[in-house]
Amino acid sequence: MNLRFLTDPRTFLGVTDVPQHALDDAAQVLHCALSGDSDAVVGTFDAVVDRSGVVGAYDVAWCLAATMVGQVPLGAWTLDFPGIDDARYDKRWVARFVSAYVNGDVPTGEALFSAAIADGQLPDCLLALAGSTIATLRHRAA
C-alpha cells in the first residue's frame, strides 16, 4: 500500500494546520501498523512525545483519523457505532475521537486525549486508532 498520500495536506479535512513532521509520523505509524509491529507503533508515538510532547501525539492521531475517514463533505455528522457502550475503553475512545474529527470538534478531541491520559489509557487508545485506521484502509482497498 502506498502511503505517500499522507504527505499531501490537501487530502485531509481539517489537517492542513499540523506540521509536516506530524504527517510523516502518521505515515510511519501506519507503516508499522501495516507490518503488524505494534511495538514499533508504540515506539513511534513515544518518539513523537519525546520530540513534540502530547501535542505532537495529538497531531499524529488527528492525521490518523483523517486517513481513516477520507474526504468528508463539511457539515454536522452523526456516526453510528452499534454497541459502543459495551465496547472496551480504547474502542469507545477511537469511535469518539473519529467522531470529533469528522465534526471538526477540536475541543472534544482534546478532551478525549486528556481523559485517556488521566485514565492511563492513551497508549492503548493510540494503538487501537492505528489498528482501526489500517483495518479501514484494507476494507476500502478490498
Image (spheres, grey):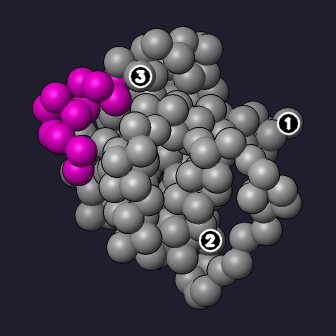
Q: Earlier in the sequence, mark 2 or mark 1?
A: 2
Q: Amino acid at mark 3?
A: Val
Which circle, 2 or 3, is nearer the viewer? 3
Task: Residue at the far left: name it.
Answer: 51
User: In the rendered view, does 133 fall on the left or right side of 62?
Assistant: right
Q: CA distance from mark 2 to mark 3?
A: 28 Å
Q: Secondary structure at mark 3?
A: helix
Q: Earlier in the sequence, mark 2 or mark 3?
A: 3
Task: Check disc 3: other Cα within 10 Å, few if <14, some if 14-19, many if 20+.
Answer: some
Q: Secondary structure at mark 2?
A: loop
Foreground residue among 112 and 37: 112
- Classify the position of the C terminus by image quarter: top right
Q: State whether residue 100 is above or below residue 77.
A: above
Q: CA distance from mark 2 to mark 1?
A: 20 Å
At x 72% / y 70%, what residue is drawn?
Answer: 79
User: Do the CB atoms of the residues marked 3 and 1 lie less than 8 Å apart?
Assistant: no
Q: Which residue is mark 2?
A: 72
At x 24% / y 39%, what residue is drawn?
Answer: 21
Q: Which mark is residue 142?
A: 1
Q: Amino acid at mark 2?
A: Val
Q: Where are the magenta residues, as a range?
A: 44-55
Q: Which mark is residue 42?
A: 3
- Classify the position of the N terminus by image quarter: top right
Q: Amino acid at mark 1?
A: Ala
Residue 124 image position (x, y, % from top left): 51, 32
At x 35% / y 18%, what residue is drawn?
Answer: 43
